[in-house]
């Protein structure tokens, strides 16, 4: 009887899929729509939930359903398939020439609650059927997240589909084999969180990837890049992880990017870290996980306010992407990377050096204007002596009108009538100079500096930093600190 009932269930689901398949809009083209903020071979996408936000296409040119193609959302009740949200996203993508990603087939979270109580044989039959029906209905998907979060969220039914097995990941191998048959024209991806900030986890991820690659089952690597990873990760760690993933020879897709912070903090984080992803030649596309205030899964990650105004990060993305199609490599602050100046010194000196100093620079917790670290040098104070903290390279700050920084003086040292400080840049082939003008701090003093960047060659900044000039009546040794260096419109 169980076999007869299961067969009947399959027929019911299949008939429902075939009957509605004619309603879906299909396309043979996989060219990325030249809409939204991105142009060229890389896409910049976002999620669609229950309905398509107005203006979606003015920002984004790739679509991932937020929940609509997760098994638990489609078949919350056994044998009752709800494809409504999935159809909305898929039809919109196909109507507008945007690549569509089916997210996801096999995942330990948001799986149907009823599947855990089934026998192993019925579990395998049900997940097989789910994958087949998804392929029949959305076979035109450019991408498919086959297995989501294998390192963090293994499905309850994994033993029914191979368990660990000889490879240690046989259930993942089985899932990709089924997906390859169901989605023969789609690129098959794996997806995981917590990778971009954890090289050790990246090594574990690469192990699974290489098992799949050796069997010809995988076409790309997904890394989620959520705010709990991105807010604090260093550029150095990001590049290390991207290097490990790139060594597999497979393309990388940033699948669920979001970053938190107030306007200034979020902007600074985007300026520092988005170019590292976008300009890496092995990253072929980036999908953000929501963008409208009140409609993102984590507060503070939105880019568009509820009143329709754009946050500074979105304004910056528009400016940055207007002149950058990606692919030149992500330095996160040098080599001509557009508008990537940002320093909070949480991960070290970040390439800064000192001139006429007694010690440093060091990343220190002795003082910070935000977060926990700043950059410290010790300076020998003498009458009208000069000191520097700076970074050299070639920087493109097109689209920005100000460079900002915060400077603090230690409570020790003989400041005399005050320590002069200014924020400066050198630009162009002749290293022309422009600065913020002099300000003065005393012992334990803090000041925010702003440098007007208008009127300079923003495409060819050679050096930026802080200059200090001691008062004529100064003496002894003091420590000075710099923090929160960033660009602003």
Image (tube, rainbow, N blue to C red):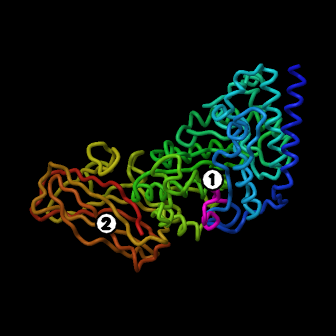
Indicate yes or no whether the magenta region holds residue 435. Answer: no
Instruction: Name the element at disc 2.
Output: strand
| Residues under numbered marks 2 and 1 in contact, where contact means CB atoms less than 8 Å apart | no
- Residue range in magenta is 43-59
Label 2 crowd bin: few (<14), some (14–19), many (20+), radius 10 Å? many
Labels 2 and 1: the sequence-earlier one: 1
Q: CA distance from mark 2 to mark 1?
A: 41 Å
Comparing marks 2 and 1, which lies closer to the viewer? 1
Q: In the visual, does 381 lie left or right of 340?
A: left
Instruction: Name the element at disc 1.
Output: strand
The answer to whether one can see residue 142 in this image is: yes
Q: Which residue is mark 2?
A: 423
Instruction: Give the residue displayed 49% in from the left and 51% down from the top.
Output: 259
Q: In the visual, does 484 lie left or right of 358?
A: right
Above or below residue 455? Residue 188 is above
Q: In the visual, does 60 lie left or right of 122?
A: left
- Give whichever of 123, 461 is nearer the camera: 123
Q: Position of residue 141 (x, y in %)?
A: 78, 51
Name the quadrant containing residue 488: bottom left
Q: Position of residue 357 (x, y in %)?
A: 27, 54
Name the quadrant containing residue 117: top right
Instruction: Give the residue displayed 31% in from the left and 44% down from the top.
Output: 364
Above or below residue 489? Residue 76 is above
Name the quadrant containing residue 51: bottom right
Taking the view exactly as shown, the residue that stands out farthest to the bottom is 455
Q: Position of residue 16 (x, y in %)?
A: 84, 43
Which quadrant of the rendered structure holds the C terminus?
bottom left
- Give whichever of 466, 303 is nearer the camera: 303
Which quadrant of the rendered structure holds the N terminus?
top right
Instruction: Give the residue displayed 82% in from the left and 39% down from the top.
Output: 216
Q: Which residue is mark 1?
A: 47
């Amino acid at each position: 009887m169980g076999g007869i009932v299961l067969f009947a269930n399959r027929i019911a689901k299949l008939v429902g899929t075939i009957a509605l398949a004619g309603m879906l809009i299909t396309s043979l083209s996989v060219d990325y729509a030249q809409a939204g903020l991105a142009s060229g071979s890389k896409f910049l996408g976002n999620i669609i939930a229950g309905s398509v936000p107005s203006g979606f296409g003015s920002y984004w040119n790739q679509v991932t359903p937020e929940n609509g193609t997760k098994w638990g959302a489609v078949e919350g009740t056994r044998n009752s398939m709800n494809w409504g949200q999935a159809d909305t996203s898929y039809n919109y993508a196909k109507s507008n020439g945007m690549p569509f990603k089916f997210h996801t087939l096999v995942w330990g979270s948001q799986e149907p609650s009823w599947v855990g109580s089934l026998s192993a044989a019925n579990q395998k039959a049900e997940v097989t059927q789910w994958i087949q029906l998804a392929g029949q209905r959305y076979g035109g998907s450019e991408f498919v997240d086959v297995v989501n979060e294998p390192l963090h969220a293994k499905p309850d039914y994994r033993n029914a589909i191979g368990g660990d097995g000889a490879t240690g990941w046989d259930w993942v191998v089985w899932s990709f084999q089924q997906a390859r048959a169901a989605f023969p024209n789609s690129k098959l991806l794996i997806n995981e969180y917590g990778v971009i900030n954890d090289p050790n986890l990246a090594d574990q991820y690469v192990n699974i990837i290489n098992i799949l690659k050796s069997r010809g089952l995988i076409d790309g690597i997904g890394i989620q890049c959520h705010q709990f990873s991105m807010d604090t990760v260093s550029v150095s760690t990001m590049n290390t992880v991207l290097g490990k993933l790139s060594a597999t020879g497979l393309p990388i897709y940033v699948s669920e990017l979001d970053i938190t912070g107030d306007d200034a903090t979020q902007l600074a984080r985007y300026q520092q870290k988005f170019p590292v992803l976008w300009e890496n030649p092995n990253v072929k596309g980036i999908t953000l996980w929501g963008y409208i205030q009140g409609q993102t899964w984590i507060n503070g990650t939105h880019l568009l306010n509820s009143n329709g105004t754009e946050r500074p990060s979105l304004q910056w993305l528009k400016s940055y992407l207007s002149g950058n199609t990606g692919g030149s490599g992500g330095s996160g602050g040098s080599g001509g990377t557009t508008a990537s100046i940002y320093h909070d010194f949480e991960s070290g000196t970040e390439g800064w050096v000192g001139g006429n100093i007694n010690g440093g620079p060091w990343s220190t917790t002795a003082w910070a204007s935000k977060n926990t670290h700043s950059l410290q040098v010790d300076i020998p104070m003498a009458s009208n002596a000069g000191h520097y903290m700076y970074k050299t390279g070639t920087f493109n700050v097109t689209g920005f009108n100000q460079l900002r920084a915060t400077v603090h003086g230690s409570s020790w040292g003989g400041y005399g009538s005050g320590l002069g400080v200014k924020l400066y840049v050198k630009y162009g082939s002749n290293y022309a100079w422009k600065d913020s003008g002099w300000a003065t701090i005393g012992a334990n003093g803090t000041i925010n500096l702003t440098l007007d960047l208008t009127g300079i060659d923003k495409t060819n900044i050679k050096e930026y930093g802080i200059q200090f000039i001691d008062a004529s009546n100064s003496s002894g040794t003091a420590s000075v600190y710099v923090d929160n260096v960033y660009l602003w419109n």
